[in-house]
Image: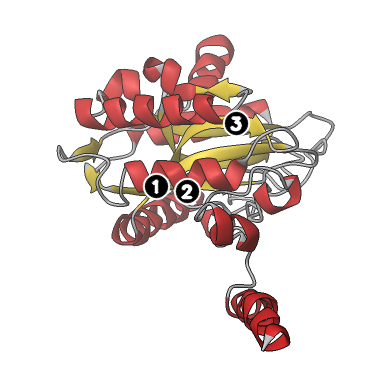
Amino acid sequence: MYNRRRFCVYIIPLVCVLMIVYLYPDPDELNILTWLYHGKQKLLDDPLQQRCQDYSPAFPSAGGPGCKTKCEPKNGQSTYTYAALFLNKTHSWPKDLLENMHLAGSILKKHGTIRSLDAERPVYLHLTFDYYCCYTESEAVMIGKFLNSYRWTPQTVSFDKIVCAIHTHGDLVSLVLMVDEDSQKKMLKYVLENEKELEKTTGIRKNIPHTRLQGFHITLGSVDQKKFPVRSAVKEINRVIRPGHWHRTPVILHRPICRRCDLLISRLT
């Protein structure tokens, strides 16, 4: 009788644990020991389980943001990377979107030290329309003039959820707010039409088309994932601010600005 009782007390719980390990192999979803004694909780004690697993299509960004390969000289001239941005200071993002970005930033701070936090500088929040990787300054002038004369059609987008992205070697990870699937499809179609018109008008072909870039997004901030529980932070933000509930007021995008292109136009023409 005593041995049977010991069997019930020790062996059956062990079998249950093994079954749970088999059914829930992802320790980020279920920590067996804490589930048994304290309930489900996040794994903050295992850095490897907290690391971001998602690489940006532009990794390792050797040519700068959005540009996978290193920029090499062209016809004896240095080449650089340029970007056309939808800036908050020229668009005035909806108040509820900015408030939720600030809330998401507060959640990040609660989890640890942050390398940068764009939500604290809302005037600089931006959504990149397109990256122009590795062009000479004279080509950038042509790109800038094209963008300034292009007949833009306002685009309405909706934001979905926070994801992490690895853009370069090392432990730096970005946390970004992605636009939703319908908006991604609409904006991708729009930007590819723009790239096609750029080549037709100026003869400049995109070195890296937007189909090989990360989807449209706003950057929330960046962290050192060696010291920061990335996956727990992302999960909590998406729990507090549910996907698709970042704003009620429509986000309308008008004309993007290539600031470096405009500076070159002023200096060289």
- Kindly report the distance in space between the C-alpha atoms of the residues bearing marks 2 and 3: 16 Å
Give amino acid for label 2.
Lys
Q: State the image quarter where residue 64 is shown.
A: top right
Q: Residue at x 82, y 39 (%)?
A: 72
Coordinates of residue 267 in the picture (x, y in percent): 57, 10
Residue at the outermost front position: 1
Along the line of sight, which residue is nearer the eye, 104 or 94? 104
- Kindly report the distance in space between the C-alpha atoms of the residues bearing marks 3 and 1: 17 Å
Q: Secondary structure at mark 1?
A: helix
Q: Residue at x 27, y 41 (%)?
A: 246
- Kindly report the distance in space between the C-alpha atoms of the residues bearing marks 1 and 2: 5 Å
Q: State the image quarter where residue 66 is shown.
A: top right
Q: Which residue is mark 2?
A: 235
Give amino acid for label 1.
Asn
Q: Secondary structure at mark 2?
A: helix
Judged left or right of residue 91, residue 111 is right
Residue at the outermost left position: 249
Q: Which residue is mark 1?
A: 238
Q: Which numbered circle lies on residue 222?
A: 3
Q: Residue at x 58, y 22 (%)?
A: 116
Judged left or right of residue 234, residue 12 is right
Q: Are marks 1 and 2 in contact (CB under 8 Å)?
A: yes
Coordinates of residue 110 in the picture (x, y in percent): 51, 26
Callout 1 environment at 10 Å: few (<14), some (14 to 19), or many (20+)?
some
Coordinates of residue 160 in the picture (x, y in percent): 34, 50
Camera-nearest label, 2 or 3: 2
